[in-house]
Amino acid sequence: MRYEGQIYRPPSEADAFILQATVGCSWNHCTYCDMYRDKSFRVRDLDETLADVRSAGEAFGERVRKVFVADGDALVLDLDHWEAILAACRSAFPVAKRVSAYATAMNINEKSPEELRRLRALGLSLLYMGPETGDDLTFKRIAKGSNFEEHVEAAARAHEAGMQVSAIFLLGAGGTERSREHAEASAKLITAMDPDFVSALTSPGCSRSSARS
């Protein structure tokens, strides 16, 4: 496969086919995360992306059970791109059970309910969201770009579309000063978002699992 730079994926996608449909992260301002600092965000040429799907399908299509669409927040792709990608994945990987991607609250909230339902119908079934905290002051300090209520709204919209949500939190994000506020607000946000899965990172950086190209 053709990958640009270092590729990151959630630990639970270790056995997934990783499709790089975007390069970098469309937000890329979070202070704790250096995963995409060396990349300028762009959408990969759709023909190249679809060619990668076809090549993977020819090589090991019957063995692919999961597809993870990279890079940092691939949900930012417009509906036309997603429709083509998901259709190609259905054709190339006939036994695949799941297609997933990283997504920000902004990505989800910018999609209409109809668009999200359409994506789910086409096979996008799991979104990995990284609120990192539930404390609105900490959200601002780490330049997350969205607050408590916006993450709750995004999770609700994803669930209403029939998608699963995996929420990621960063231990210590509030620092010593706001340790209690960060912990308590994060617990409240987990309850409010009601994610299907929750994980906690302990690294001071944004250490999602990675695979080198």
Image (tube, rainbow, N blue to C red):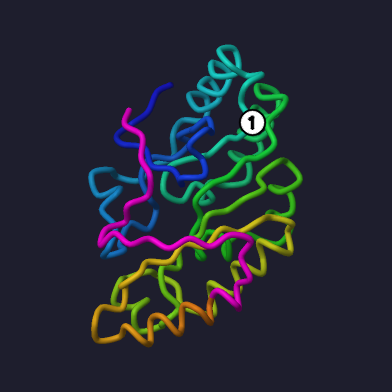
> In percent of the image, x 36 and y 40: which residue is there?
210
Q: Is residue 179 magenta?
A: no
Left or right: 141 with respect to 131? left
> In percent of the image, x 51 and y 51: which residue is there?
76
Give the quarter of the figure containing the N terminus: top left
> Where does residue 173 sit, x and y in percent of width and height?
31, 72
Residue stretch in magenta: 190-213
The answer to whether 15 is drawn above or below residue 11 in the figure is above
> Where does residue 58 sit, x and y in percent of width and height?
59, 12
> In percent of the image, x 30 and y 85: which residue is there?
178
Query: Farthest residue in the top direction?
Result: 58
Q: Residues within 10 Å of mark 1 (few under 14, many from 20)?
A: some
Give the quarter of the figure containing the C terminus: top left
> Where does residue 145 sit, x and y in percent of width and height?
40, 70
> Where does residue 174 sit, x and y in percent of width and height?
31, 78
> In percent of the image, x 41 and y 68: which residue is there?
132
Q: Which residue is denoted by mark 1 in the rendering?
A: 65
- Residues 101 and 42: in front is 101
- Residues 211 and 158: in front is 211
Residue type at mark 1?
Arg
- The secondary element bearing badge 1 is classed as loop
Q: Quadrant of residue 138?
A: bottom left
- Residues 79 and 141: in front is 141
Q: Is residue 195 magenta?
A: yes
The answer to whether 5 is drawn above or below residue 160 in the figure is above
